[in-house]
Image (spheres, helix red, strand yellow):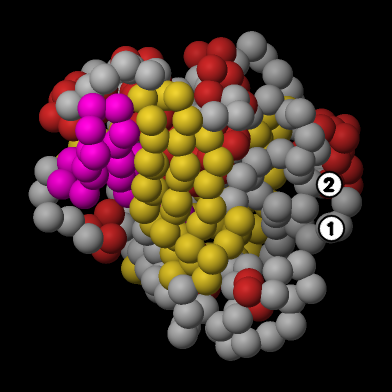
Amino acid sequence: LAYMLKHDSVHGRFHGDVAIEGNTLVVNGKKIRLTAVKDPAELKWNEVGADVVIESTGLFLTKETCEKHLAAGAKKVIMSAPSKDDTPMFVYGVNDKSYKGESIISNASCTTNCLAPIAKVLNDKWGIKRGLMTTVHAATATQKTVDGPSNKDWRGGRGILENIIPSSTGAAKAVGVVIPQLNKKLTGMAFRVPTSDVSVVDLTCELEKEATYDEICQAMKEASQGSMKGVLGYTDQKVVSTDFRGESCTSIFDAEAGMALDKSFVKVVAWYDNEWGYSTKVLEMVRTVAK
């Protein structure tokens, strides 16, 4: 764990002080208890005074299973993935103001955190009649470096180093949970590609009210400088994916990449560091629920 914290193939070396003292990880003088148990109910969060637990194993994605963290002494739990039940879902900067003290919430996915801000700007100003999303997504730990068996998804078992792999994603449908007005109006899919980090969303949609592409760009720019500052970014430069490594905004609108067929049928494009950006917004939700 200490080694992985010091050395990261994407984000580089961590230049702080990292050490292991028995069952304690020490980072820049701050001590972090290390445990290795399978049942969250045995984690004894009360012993370390944990107020908020980030459930990032990907294994406990229902209220029932996350309640074990509460039984162990935690006060709040945030899933760092979409829930598999009706656990309230939040995207910071989009619907975080509707948080009402729930003890267990989901922070949605990195892709939903990219899609929701641009969808909100479009829907608030012109209305979205319907839309399709595609994310061109960097490889993740679930994928194989060489071909191997995969019972759940045969294409997902193919080696990521040599392939562009079509995949499913619930990110677009999840926007309908975060923004109820868009429920059942969006769906989408993913292409997993052989890059290590940074992904990009393409939202192609039909608007209820007409707008020029220039007007859409202006609305995105205004939101990035106003109500969504720090969440939605804006660029009109000739950028590529690596330009966004370490970017804390979870959705960076690319004015140069989008287009409009006419005043009601548009394509908007937004970048996101699916590792770094998403993690920063998990921490923002931690601050929100801890108030």
Nearer-the-camera pick, 148 or 102: 148
Residue located farthest toward the left when viewing the structure as drawn: 237
Where 189 sits versus 18, above or below? above
Query: In the picture, residue 6 is in which quadrant?
Result: bottom left
The structure residue drawn at horizontal position 61% and vertical position 56%, both measured from the top left corner, is 168
Question: Is 168 left, or right, of 268 in this rendering?
Answer: right
Label 2 crowd bin: few (<14), some (14–19), many (20+), radius 10 Å:
some
Q: How many marks?
A: 2
- Disc 1 crowd, CA 10 A, few/some/many (<14, 14-19, 20+): few
Tag 1 residue: 37
**Which element is circle 2 on?**
helix
Return the x and y of residue 197 as percentages of the image width and height.
Answer: 40, 63
Locate the N terminus by quadrant: bottom right
Question: Would residue 266 be counted in the magenta stretch?
Answer: yes
Residue 253 visible, this orientation: no
Q: Up-down: is 73 above or below 288? A: below
Question: Do the residues bearing badges 2 and 1 touch, measured as CB atoms within 8 Å?
Answer: yes
Magenta residues span: 248-275
Residue 137 point in image, percent of width and height: 45, 60
Q: Residue tagged by mark 2?
A: 40
